[in-house]
Amino acid sequence: MHTPFSFVVKQFSSSARSLRHTRTLTTTGVLLAIQMVLSSYGTIEVTDSLKISLAHLALAPTAVFFGPVVAGMQGALSDILALAIKPTGPYFPGFTLSAMLLGLFYGLALYKTKRKLWQVVAVRLAVMVIINIGLNTLFLTMLYGPSRLVTLPVRALKNLIQFPADCFLLYSMCRVLYRVPDPLTVR
């Protein structure tokens, strides 16, 4: 009998083992570069604390092929590199944690699964509520003060409006990736 805990442990251990392969590192490096381009040039800045970005889509292939550990590492590295390449404010480790959690969530939901629509909707909903609205709002208030709490309704509305598009784009990408052979098994 499989418990949710054993599923998570299996996902993490399999993902961590994939780090031993050169193909994992090179493929993740290319996807990280794509993510950097998307975060630098594919982001619409509505206000200084409200942005619309497609950079999270570059995490999907890493999550699908290499799992939560590798996708979490890519997420954290992307935050650090994005700040080094194009600073948008002071460094705050909370946002690095958010980026890492995004990769972990994607990896747990999309790694070695059929990637059905309900999985994509569930992971985007978790990302929206826990990371985008919850943690990132908390981190903004920690960084800039309680006056940032007034942005909470705007941030929630933006995420609610963007939710269907994010689900559609992520699900479409997953359907394409479903047909791509696993980079670790291709010779």
Image: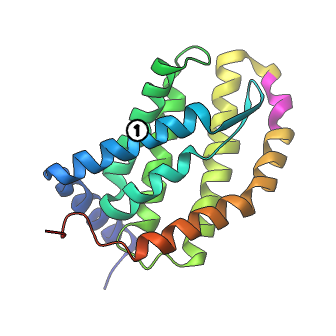
Q: Read off the magenta span.
A: 148-152
What residue sits right under mark 1 in the picture? 33
Judged left or right of residue 13, residue 5 is right
- Residue 155 image offset from top left, x and y in percent: 79, 40
Vertical arrangement, residue 9 with respect to residue 79, above or below: below
The quadrant of the image that shows the C terminus is: bottom left
Q: Is residue 35 part of the magenta span, yes or no?
A: no
Q: Residue at x 75, y 50 (%)?
A: 159
* SS at circle 1: helix
Vertical arrangement, residue 13 with respect to residue 1, above or below: above
- Residue 186 image offset from top left, x and y in percent: 19, 69
Q: Amino acid at mark 1?
A: Ala
Q: Residue at x 39, y 77 (%)?
A: 179
- Residue 115 image offset from top left, x and y in percent: 48, 75
As rendered, which of 85 and 47 lies closer to the eye? 85
Judged left or right of residue 117, residue 104 is left
Vertical arrangement, residue 40 with respect to residue 104, above or below: above
Q: Quadrant of residue 76?
A: top left
